[in-house]
Image: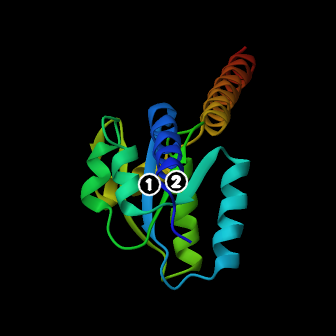
Amino acid sequence: MPLNLDKKKIIVSNINKISNTALSAITADTQGIAVNDINELRRSGRKIGVKMSIVQNTLLSLGIQNTSFACLKKKIKGSTFIAYSTQHPGSGARLFKDFSKINPRFKITGAAFEGKLLSILEINQLADMPTYNEAIIKVLFVLKMASAGKLISILSAIKKQKETS
């Protein structure tokens, strides 16, 4: 069923609104992927603040105009599936990377972060970037290990001092 002009304007407006608030965006080719798998991917994305949609390329190009994701226009070809990360910049990339491991036909075609088109290496780095909570846990672990090391060195110093006395 073809879309009328009013519906197309609404779609472009929604894409533009999301593009102005999202932290990063990633695109993929979903050709050959089962609809149930895509629906499961969307469910997983909603849990972590990733907004996804499959939109006509023309409408997507119009929606990302004058946003930090305008650089993605070069990557919009064929069947384009786009995901916007709204809470953590790497969540969409991580979600797509994990999904592509299970579904080899799912191909990541591009990503944008801070107005820059990312290479495959940079997409992987973005996907591997820890979330805020993961970073806090790592810092606490390092602090815990450092304090345990200090405690051990203090205890061994006390032991040595008692042995020499």
Q: Secondary structure at mark 1?
A: strand
Way the structure is coloured: rainbow
Corner quadrant of residue 155: top right
Q: Amino acid at mark 1?
A: Ile
**Residue drawn at x 28%, y 42% as measured from the top left:** 116
Q: Position of residue 122 (x, y in %)?
A: 34, 52
Q: Position of residue 23 (x, y in %)?
A: 48, 36
**Residue drawn at x 52%, y 39% as measured from the top left:** 18
Looking at the image, residue 36 sits to the left or right of residue 23; the answer is right
Looking at the image, residue 95 sits to the left or right of residue 40; the answer is left
**Disc ID at residue 26:** 1
Towards the viewer: 82 or 108: 82
**Residue drawn at x 45%, y 46% as measured from the top left:** 12
Looking at the image, residue 66 sits to the left or right of residue 148; the answer is left
Towards the viewer: 165 or 54: 54
**Disc ID at residue 83:** 2
Count of residue discs: 2
The relative height of residue 118 versus residue 24 in the rendered view (above or below) is below
Q: Amino acid at mark 2?
A: Ala
Q: Quadrant of the N terminus?
A: bottom right
Residue 67 visible in this rendered orientation of the protein: yes
Q: Quadrant of the C terminus?
A: top right
The relative height of residue 55 versus residue 157 in the rendered view (above or below) is below
